[in-house]
Image (cartoon, coloured by chain):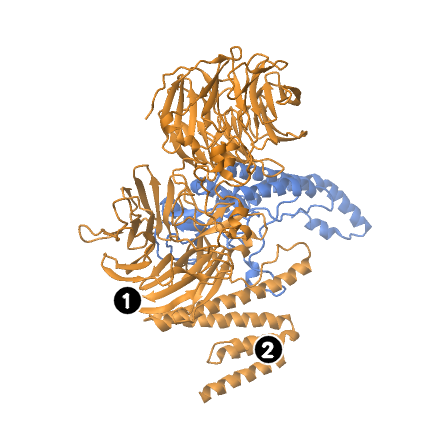
Amino acid sequence: MALPLQAGLTPMEVAFLCEMEMVTVVPRQRLESLNLLSGPTPILRPPHRAPIPLWLALLLKRQRRANILPPPWLLSSSLERILKYETETSPLAFSPPPPHPHPVTSRSSPTDFVSPPFLPSSTADAPPDYLPYHWLELGEIFLEAASDDVPEQDRVRGLLRDLREVRMSKMRGSIKGLEGEGGGVSKMTGVGAMEVAEGRGYIVGVLDGLRRLGSSREVARREREAEEGGEGSEDEEMGFE
Amino acid sequence: MATTTQVRLRGRPAHTRGPTFLSYTPDGTKLITVGSNNTTRVYKTGFDGEPTNIDDCPEQNTGVASTDDFFLVGSEDGNVSKFSLETMAFDKYITRCSLPIRDVTLSLDGKWCAVSSDELVVKIIRMNDTSSVMFLREQPKPVKHLSFDPSGKHIALSCTDGLVYVYSLINDEPELVRKIDGLIRTLETEDEISSKVVWHPDGRAFAAPTATRDIQVMSRGDWENQRTFTNGHNGDITALAWSPNGAMLASAAKDWKVLLWETKTQKVIATYDYADVMDISWHPTKNLLSFTNTEGWVYIYNDFVPEEHSHLLKLPLQPAPFIHDPLSEISANARRPITNGLKDIPNRGARRGTPDSLDDILGSDIMGDEDDFVVDDDGAGYASGLNANGKRPNGAVDPYVGSVNKRRTQAWEPQIHDSFQPGSTPWRGNRKYLCLNLIGFVWTVDQDTHNTITVEFYDHEFHRDFHFTDTFLYDKACLNENGTLFSCPPNDDTPATIFYRPHETWTARADWRTQLPKGEEVTAMSLSDSFITVTTSAQYVRIYTLFGIPYRVYRQKSSPTVTCASWRDYVLTLGNGPVGADGNTKLLYTIQNIKRDEICQSEDVVALPEGETIKSVFFSDNGDPCIYDSTGTLLTLLHWRTPSQATWVPLLDTKLLSRLASGKKQETYFPVAVADNKFHCIILKGTDQYPYFPRPLLSEFDFQIPLSSKPKADSGDDAEAEAENESDELGKFESDFVLKSVLTAQQQDLVDFTKSSHSQRTALARMEVEIDKTLLQMMAVECREGEERGMRALEMVTLLRDSTGRMIEAAGKVAERYGRNVLGEKIREVGEMRLSAMEED
């Protein structure tokens, strides 16, 4: 029996995955190394910074044993620049994701396939001015659980909301590109996990509708093509899967 | 004590009832008053007859400002008119506003005029070209008062929204420097109550009336509240003016009183009863003060300063009332500016006036001698009534620096390095950090009669924060895992005292206090796990055990002392040595092991570039001495345990950090510690020199030996970016190699010279393997790049440290993998030669 779940991840699941992201904490108490499934955590010695997974950081934060350092992109100055990029520099495309920390060279190496949440894109050393894959979830979690560690939190909250709206409208706008013959491709570089999860239901619905609307035309065309010799129909079938 | 003078002065009915304003010309010869009627009156100083009247002027005047040649009048019809003092007639309109003018002021040099009106914009107009206007637009409400600072580089706007806006006028485009909240109160533009900011004549501070009827002084450097003139008025303050030399302050209020305050003590020295005073103006030189009231009367008060205090007027320029004046403070942290060019000339502070000099005899009405700054300040006049104006020829020169040409002629003096306490900051406002390190921080708050000291730790589990009232006024502190050390400067009757307080005790009372001989002052001190080191002004290095047993006392060879640092039994002392080629003394350091009584380095030179100073000295967590200098470089001492083998090695140049590569950020770093092979510091934004409250977060940077400056962020071209990537990768390995070599050398020394533990030895072995690994990685890159880089690759192989031959074997394999057969052959040869050499040994 199949569970009545939609395809893809729910927002809860995305947020859960996001908690695997590494963040930088400034501990306020000593903590010996913990042997976790993902490997041992660094020894926490105040005031030395240490990278630990977000879920552990939240746990320590809740117990007032640590302060979480917000990643550089979550500062208002950086978010302002990203917002400017999204609205003015490139009003159509999404802002690019952070550059891959391991240089991708012509030779393949195991690091080429490391992807979030296993990339250090939200530690204190992460590059500013780029939204990482888990930006929305991480921003929300930070503002909820560690708001006192985020400078100018009200401004940051507003900027995150602005960014989310700008990017949502881009996401919706990109559907126009999906419409019509021969199109059906939109560039998703830089889209975050939560945005994919949110957009999925809507986009899939729209595509389904489009396909249903176009199906009669499709049938007619296929018939015509069958009459002409039946070429090139295979591609069309692949179209909107 | 306050005295009430009972002699009533008769006012002169100058204007009809309404707001009346006045201004002395900078030369003090004339007093100009304007009021609500259409007559402007010009009184001649020292002449008691009828004033000169200028009739054809607007009514309802709201401001007046004057220079020796002309004066400006602003009125409610929105015009600012210029009148000539020569012809005593209207000259021209300067500007026009659509709403009533609220204040007019001239900069001290008379070149700029600022106008505020009920419009939101404040105009700053160039007097010799009235078409060139600067606009100040940041304030959301109309501005009630304006005031230029004595240098004319800043202007303070008292806005009706209760904030003071300070703009900088140094550049062509005025720039909002600071919004000051909570200083003045919210007022309407028509109110008789004043919220005017008046700059102290020394330009470093200004005073403003507060809502609590006090007068608050605030410093311009750090925007901190300084001394307050309190408990004087029982009504809202309506006018405020500093005496021309800043030694006194006159204020008037709604309680019908005019008070005269002494700046130094903030005490009232005279009280006068005059109702509804609107505006006060000091005569630039004489003991003469004039004020106007809302009845339109003008009072010209001769001998306003009582006889017993009149000497105050004769003083040269007095400093503003700071809580801790950065200039007079004999703080361990007082630093001279970075020496450069003309500033190298030794600065001896302000020149005092000669008693019975020609200037005194002639009286200072004569504005002749431009060179003599005492006359400048007195004679140029600082009429700080409504219109802070006048001329001072050397307006741009800081009165405390004195003119450069004058110093030229004086005998040359070496520049010595001031003593300082590592990790502490100077006073700012009433607070200062005594000690900042990785254990915690100690700070003190000046409460006038005593200080309160707070010690906070980063690790709340291990230590408990504490707080105490400090009657000794401690000014230096050290903090480590075991305890806190304080010292206080000598007082009139009590000698300098050292106070140590351990964090944990098993006896009832473990803290102790010891006194230095009379007159001796602590210049710096340090606390290690086993000893307390104190350097004193008598050139002694005094070493105590942790529980106060004097262990050793010796005189430091290089003097005057600068600072000291210690780690376990090692003590590093720093002193001024002989004068170097750049006119600064060379800093000399000595490192000795106290317990073993060995001198590791004796009077060796601290390598500093020309004219640079040292910011901090400390030991890293591994026990290696580190310095941070004013160029922003962190250096460590290598091989310091062997006499005369020590070299200073740079570990990090903060100017080359990638975060500054964009060139947009301006920041400096306050060094805190070196631990875990990282540099811990506090990032200071802009022109800040020291951290302040609230305590900023510590930042950490990895070491990065300055080999090359990072290229700017790559742009566009993919092929270029890729090539850059390659060189980047190689560069990273190269700097890794150099850094690891330095760190390994330090570890090697540590293992060789101390009773090393097993883990230290294995760490050393691991580090050596790491170096070889880095070399192999570099070699792999070279092999990949091509056959022609083979010689470089071979050189890397010869640098391998490993003696077992396994690393060379691995290098051979790398060469093979990339198909560099010739290189592989050569590597094998190197390997064989090494092995045979080993066998011969």
For badge 2, the amino acid type reads Glu
Q: Nearer the viewer, residue B141 or B415?
A: B415
Q: Quadrant of the N terminus of chain B?
A: top left
Residue at which label 2 appears: B816
Picture layout, residue A53 above or below residue B103? below
For badge 1, the amino acid type reads Lys
Q: Nearer the viewer, residue B597 or B679?
A: B597
Locate residue A123 relative to residue B463 in the image: left or right: right
Q: Nearer the viewer, residue B602 or B652?
A: B602
Q: Position of residue B397 (x, y in %)?
A: 54, 41
- For image coordinates 32% across by 71% down, the residue present is B755
Colour-to-chain, orange = B
**Chain of residue at mark 2:** B
At mark 1, the secondary structure is: loop
Q: Nearer the viewer, residue A128 or A133?
A: A128
Q: Position of residue B436 (x, y in %)?
A: 38, 50
- Colour of the chain lettered A: blue
Please tell me which of labels 1 and 2 falls first in the chain.
1
Q: What's the CA distance linking mark 1 and mark 2?
A: 56 Å
Picture layout, residue B325 above or below residue B37? below
Locate residue B728 relative to residue B194 in the image: left or right: right
**Chain of residue at mark 1:** B
Outermost residue on the top side: it is B16
Q: Quadrant of residue B709?
A: bottom right
Q: Nearer the viewer, mark 1 or mark 2?
A: 1
- For image coordinates 28% across by 55% down, the residue present is B482
Q: Position of residue B515 (x, y in %)?
A: 24, 52
Q: Across the whole image, how many numbered discs are drawn on residues?
A: 2
Residue at which label 1 appears: B595
Q: Is residue B251 visible?
A: yes
* Residues at marks 1 and 2 touching, judged by CB atoms closer than 8 Å: no
- For image coordinates 47% across by 48% down, the residue present is B347
